[in-house]
Image (spheres, grey):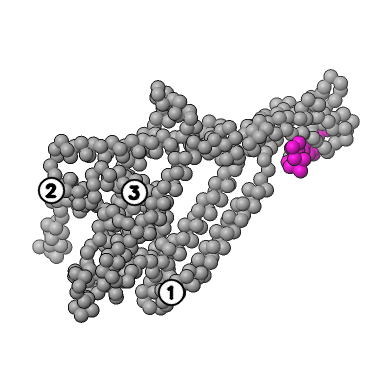
Amino acid sequence: MSQALKDIKVRSENLPTANASLYAAGEKIYPRDVRGRFTRWRQLFVIATQLVYFGLPWINWQGQQALWFDMENFRLYCFGQTFWPQDFVYLSALLICSAFGLFLWTAVAGRLWCGYACPQTVYSEIMLWIERRVEGDRKARIQLDQQAMNGRKFAIKSLKHGLMLLFSLITGVTFVSYFTPMRTLIAAAPSLNYGPWEIFWILFYGGFTYLFAAHLREQVCKYMCPYARFQGVMFDPDSLIISYNGARGEPRAARNLAEDRQALGHGDCVNCGLCVQVCPVGIDIRAGLQYECIGCAACIDACDEVMDKMHYPRGLIGYTSENIQQGKYSASQIKRRILRPRVLLYVLALGAALGITLGAYAMRLPFRVELMRDRSALVRETADGLLENTYLFKVMNVSSHDQHFRIAAQGLHGLALAADESVLTVKAGQMRLQGVRLRAAPQDAGPGGHPVVFTVRLLEDPSAQVQETSSFIGE
């Protein structure tokens, strides 16, 4: 038998059989409850983000919902301002500013977004809170899952998942309320008089909230989120990351409070495992920085609590950097190292993007004008012998109050608009199409096209005006 055939035979013998599993079975993680300063910050962000998300649809602003995506009329209401598809540039600018902000705080302190404000983290924290209140602490939850199904376990599990489904349904309704006003949804609730798309998105958004936050949890962060994969390119040796001080903690060993660790040759780590038990993604931070770490700092709170009980100094697990761990500078110099060239470049880029965006928005007129010629009849003669061209104005009022406009034209001697068409009113947040007839004497408008300039002026603020160019066709 040739060597190639032998190699094929060996490889075929090593292939998994039909009953073999290609993937390691996932183990359910039971995060332990923890107290501390970072936990309080995380809870504060959960409350703040949900107050904004659930509260905005209930706020009325000048007679309508403060934030409303009016998809039927292709416009967005945002606290009295109306944005049309032509204002898409502001959304692009907002996304650019968000990207630079993400680069900035990642370069400074790692995955702060993931650990404190990401919807996956926030909703997982809420689901864990429900789970702890219904099933108990970590030990009780583990014991409950190890039990065979019985009446008590079925009741507890049903209550837990019922509350999770209810919360997920509320998140779905709230999501849809940004497109169909909340008060409209509430009024239709008794009869469930919702449209098919409303029902679809309530179930879709609520269903995925339940799936991701109640079941998948850390798997979304570990296997589905792309940020975990490319965050490494935004780190540098000075970025603050959550790290275990191995030089201080090793060799780790369990002990009681009366034992002298130095005499026994032990490090500060008592090998209690609490840093692993409180981790929502189930990693051991003592093994070094791992891409699964979401930077929630739960392990810091747990370790600090143990250090306090052992009367050891805090900081065995803490925010540090690679250069600090290598002794290139001391921990007291962290603040000075934050303002390094990479961070300053991100600050400048973010500041420039914000400045340009805010400047452009400040110069944004409270109305928009589009001019179109009526090409079905380029020129016609009126009963009194004048030449007449017809134009169509589309005026969009992007403010929160009614506006009045005056249209004027210049470019030819004796050029005039029909008197009843020179002034128009556009209601707040609305768009109006206005036909305009422009007239000139035949002796003033010879054959061919003549350039004309239309001026649309806001009567409430004469300095706000828009000019549009077109042409007047003569005979």
- Residue type, numbered disc 3: Glu
Q: Give the residue displayed 40% in from the left and 59% down from the top.
A: 111
The percent position of residue 87, horizontal first and vertical second, equals 59, 43
The disc at residue 19 is: 2
Task: Determine the secondary structure under disc 1.
Answer: helix
Give the image quarter of residue 228: bottom left
Task: Determine the secondary structure under disc 3.
Answer: helix
Where are the magenta residues, as a range? 447-467
Q: Nearer the viewer, mark 2 or mark 1?
A: 1
Which is the main secondary structure of the residues drawn in magenta? strand
Mark 2 Cα within 10 Å, few/some/many (few <14, many 20+)?
few
Rendered-image quadrant of the C terminus? top right
Residue 276 as seen in the image, left or right of residue 112: left
Mark 1 Cα within 10 Å, few/some/many (few <14, many 20+)?
few
Q: Give the residue displayed 56% in from the left and 33% down from the top.
A: 64
Rendered-image quadrant of the N terminus? bottom left
Distance from label 1 to label 3 (Cα)?
Answer: 33 Å
Q: Upstream in the sequence, badge 2 or badge 1?
A: 2
Q: Upstream in the sequence, badge 2 or badge 3?
A: 2
- Residue type, numbered disc 1: Ser
Q: Give the residue displayed 70% in from the left and 34% down from the top.
A: 403
Mark 3 Cα within 10 Å, few/some/many (few <14, many 20+)?
many
Residue 178 as seen in the image, left or right of residue 286: right
The disc at residue 125 is: 3
Residue 53 is covered by the magenta coloring: no
Relative vertical location of residue 253 with respect to residue 85 in this rendering, above or below: below
- Dot 1 corresponds to which residue? 332
